[in-house]
Image: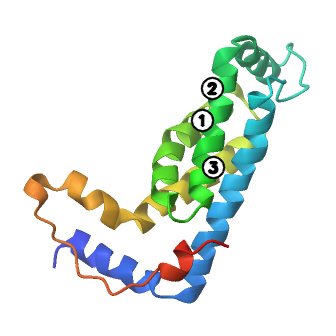
Amino acid sequence: MNALLLLAQVIELLKRLRVVQLFTIYLRYLIGSAFVFASVPKILGKRFTQIPVSDPVGFYFEAMYQTGFYWNFLGWGQMIAAVLLMTQRFAALGAVMFYPIIINVWLVTWSVGFKGTPVITFLMFLGNTYFLVWEYRRFVPLLQPESRLQIPPSDFDDSFMRKPV
């Protein structure tokens, strides 16, 4: 049996478990809300941290803050991705938008020398990867040549996940 087909079947089995469905919803809200809170100071044009510029982390944030429009752009990008991620209906689009953002944040926290934060941002990266795997059916047509979909049929009903709260 093809390994990808087996993986797709395992994913479909897991998607039927209510606990996994609830985990997915709560994780979307957890990661999304973290980025809503991180984006607000940037949108308002305020500094993100009070770390002095003598520290490499403070220097990095001050340099980003001094860019002006780019600082606001980062905030709006984070806000839009976070809100889409938390809507459930547009969660796949939010996860796609969020992926390059969280990779960038993770690499910056790792390279600048944050203490503890690279672990958190890496976990957020893994969570977003989980979202993309959860929505794999939406991406298969983009990845398979000539649109020959070779994924197992699904009877998974996620309607309760797409209803407004």
Q: Please state if 40 lies on the left or on the right of 129 as rendered.
A: right
Where does the C terminus fall, quadrant-wise?
bottom right
Q: Quadrant of residue 114?
A: top right
On the image, the x and y values in percent for residue 162 come to 53, 73
Task: Give the mark, 1 or 3, whose residue is nearer the N terminus.
Answer: 1
On the image, the x and y values in percent for residue 5 come to 22, 74
Amino acid residing under circle 3: Ala
- Mark 1 vs mark 2, CA separation in Å: 6 Å
Q: As rendered, which of 146 and 127 lies closer to the eye?
A: 146
Amino acid residing under circle 2: Phe
Secondary structure under the numbered disc 3 in the rendered image: helix
Looking at the image, which residue is at 73% across and 37% down? 39
Numbered badge on residue 56: none
Secondary structure under the numbered disc 2 in the rendered image: helix
Numbered badge on residue 73: 2
Q: Are marks 1 and 3 in contact (CB under 8 Å)?
A: no
- Mark 1 vs mark 3, CA separation in Å: 8 Å
Q: Which residue is mark 3?
A: 82
Looking at the image, which residue is at 74% across and 50% down? 34
Where does the N terminus fall, quadrant-wise?
bottom left
Q: Quadrant of residue 132?
A: bottom left
Q: Are marks 1 and 2 in contact (CB under 8 Å)?
A: yes
On the image, the x and y values in percent for residue 112 come to 69, 26
Q: Please state if 135 lies on the left or on the right of 107 as rendered.
A: left
Numbered badge on residue 77: 1
Looking at the image, which residue is at 68% across and 42% down? 118
Q: Is residue 122 above or below residue 63?
A: below
